[in-house]
Image: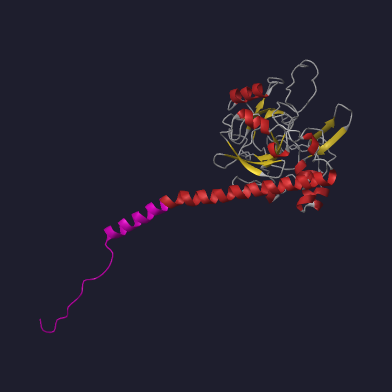
Amino acid sequence: MPGSRFMPPRRGWTIAELLVTLGVISLLLALLAPAIQSARESARKIDCGNRLKQILLATEAFASNRQRYPEYSSGGIDQQGVRHWNVCPLVEILPYLDQAPLHDGIDKHEWFGAFDAYGSGQLYSGQNAQWVRHTIPLYQCPSDRQEPGSCNYRVSLGSGADWYTFSPGPPDPTCLDPKNGNGAFETMKALTPADVTDGLSTTVFSSERVIADGNGSQYDPWRDYSQVQANWPHCTADELRSTCRSIAGVAPNHASVAGFTWIYATKAHTAYDHISPPNSRVSDCARDSSSEPGASNSAIAARSQHAGGVNAAMGDGSVRFASEQIDLAVWRQLGSRNGRD
């Protein structure tokens, strides 16, 4: 018509088109998210292995300088009448990690300087109080939850049910696991590379364990360990593992702050064993108490937040990923330094 203008159709999005587009984008993000998370965890697992390797290299530097590995001891007097102080390998290697001033400020002569894992805050050395929750990032796995001063990396005490290598006194003189003291570290004894007769490349020196949940009112079977009440319910590794399976979630007390410090030589915080396989479905347990928090007679497995297994540092400096599907007998052999296997 004269004087009229042709109006082209308006270009834009309909509500239906917008909803379809948003749905497609959401679907793509849902498909990509697991891959992104997997890539991030893969990077964290590699980072974790590198931290463990640095710890082992510092341990080797210590051994090269001293002709022995760092001693593991929570104090006491050995069979030869020699007194041992509270000496934790993670403390001893600090000078080889550019942390000499921190090492020199720690009181190692407080032989009963323990920090219990039950949340009561029991501490016997005032000098060490300032260091118990001091954070060393190298000692924390990036895949796990982190607490001030927490420690994921632990030394191996082997596959025995307890620490002593001699027959105990009455009433249990026969309660002795022949595997006691067969790990890369032995209580109250400074080992040398020559003591690792199975070979450095086939002996696990250190691995990782998750940090406890920090909640004393709620038991977490993955992170906490149960307290065994009876004095000697288990003399061998298999008996101890069976006890752990039976009391999980039933024991009245559990350790809720295990791994909360790197200072003290105790399986509550800085050591583990090869009694159970990595990421064991059998929860950990220990003959322990708040008055004697050493977790000596205990089964504390290597555990991590990595899917499928844990990082393990061998005596030759290599770091391997140990599958949680590994045969238990093989895992125990890897935890032994002198089993001829």
- Residue 40: say if magenta: no
Which of the 4 quarters of the picture holds residue 326? top right
Instruction: Determine the residue located farthest toward the left in the rendered image.
Output: 1
In-front residue for pair 62/340? 340
- Residue 309, given in percent of the width and then of the height, sits at 58, 39
| Rendered position, 337 above or below 89 | above
In-front residue for pair 338/259? 338
| Rendered position, 167 above or below 141 | above
Q: Is residue 235 left or right of residue 195?
A: left
**Quadrant in which the N terminus is drawn:** bottom left
> Do we see residue 139 in this rendering?
no
Which of the 4 quarters of the picture holds residue 177? top right
- Residue 41, given in percent of the width and then of the height, sits at 55, 48
Q: Is residue 298 left or right of residue 66?
A: left
> What residue do we see at 59% from left, 22% from top?
246
What's drawn in magenta, residue-wise?
A: 1-30
> What residue do we see at 89% from left, 31% from top?
82
| Rendered position, 316 above or below 290 | below
- Residue 265, given in percent of the width and then of the height, sits at 76, 37
In-front residue for pair 93/171? 93
Instruction: Determine the residue located farthest toward the top in the rendered image.
Output: 171
Colour logic: secondary structure
**Quadrant in which the C terminus is drawn:** top right
Which of the 4 quarters of the picture holds residue 191? top right
